[in-house]
Image (cartoon, rainbow, N blue to C red):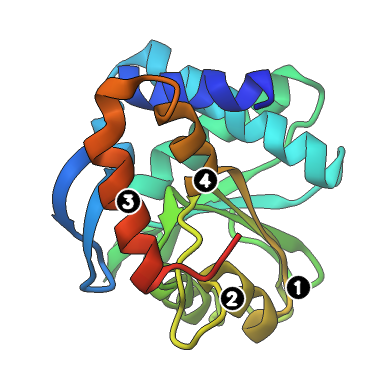
Amino acid sequence: MESYKREFIEFLQQAGVLKFGDFTAKSGRKIPYFINAGMIKTGEDISKLGEFYAQAYFARLGKKPTVLYGPAYKGISIAVSAAVALSKNGLNIPFFFNRKEAKDHGEGGIFVGYVPQAGEEVVIVEDVITAGTAIRESMSILSQLEGVKVAASFVMVDRKEKGQGDKGAMQEISDEFGFPVFSIVDVYDIIEYLEEDPANEENVTRIKNYLAVNGAGV
């Protein structure tokens, strides 16, 4: 396993972002592990997370100028921290996020921060994709921006699950909307990491059993 993947999984556990048990995803699926960016609560941790996203951004997009979009609510802190990390490494790009309810006073509207203009490209930063529900919601919101194109999306973990059909959710999103979805690690990286310690046997078995039903393959 590449060292950055190990470092990222260790970070997710240390910060309480990666947990094991019985959870319900936004898709409605009952899942044996959960990725919750809302557990990142300190300046040090959100700074580290931004650095991992920036590393993934540079690896996939180089220094391509885009606009970062963080869907409310968990995506907001990700977008801000990623923008800061990118700027520290020579790429100063704007960011924005949405309100859950449109504001009818002040500057008004549904967006906060930089509002992309026609011809500009957006990168969506999310915590995780299970069935693609959240990304589809984001695309519906972003469709209000005329002439703006989504260049890519980045998530913490590719759960390698089926989307609405038999394809992986990330592949479905890519096919449906025409942009790539990248992850820092995937569920098989997590399994590989857990298998190094026999104490994790129960969690590994539960995840593998879940993927046997809901997985879209490696």
**First-in-chain label (4 vs 2):** 2
- Proximity of marks 4 and 3: CB atoms separated by less than 8 Å: no
Task: Indicate left or right for 82 with 18 as reference.
Answer: right
215 above or below 177? above
Query: Can you tell which mark lies on residue 173?
Result: 2
Q: Quadrant of residue 200?
A: top left
**First-in-chain label (3 vs 2):** 2
Instruction: Name the secondary structure under disc 1.
Output: loop
Q: Nearer the viewer, mark 1 or mark 4?
A: 4
Nearest to the observer: residue 18 or residue 49: 18
Tell me the amino acid under the disc marked 1: Ala
State the image coordinates of residue 20 (x, y, percent, origin top left): 21, 39
Q: Residues within 10 Å of mark 1 (few under 14, many from 20)?
A: few
State the image coordinates of residue 173 (x, y, percent, origin top left): 59, 76
Tell me the amino acid under the disc marked 2: Ile
Q: Nearer the viewer, mark 1 or mark 2?
A: 2
Q: CA distance from mark 1 to mark 3?
A: 43 Å
* Residue at numbered disc 1: 118
State the image coordinates of residue 13 (x, y, percent, origin top left): 33, 24
Q: CA distance from mark 3 to mark 2?
A: 23 Å
174 above or below 153? below
Residue under the image location 52 percent in, 25 percent down = 8
Q: Quadrant of the C terminus?
A: bottom right
Tell me the amino acid under the disc marked 3: Ile
Q: Residues within 10 Å of mark 4 (few under 14, many from 20)?
A: some
Query: Can you tell which mark lies on residue 207?
Result: 3
Instruction: Name the secondary structure under disc 4.
Output: helix
Residue under the image location 67 percent in, 74 percent down = 174
Q: Quadrant of residue 185?
A: top right
Tell me the amino acid under the disc marked 4: Tyr
- Proximity of marks 1 and 2: CB atoms separated by less than 8 Å: no
* Residue at numbered disc 4: 188
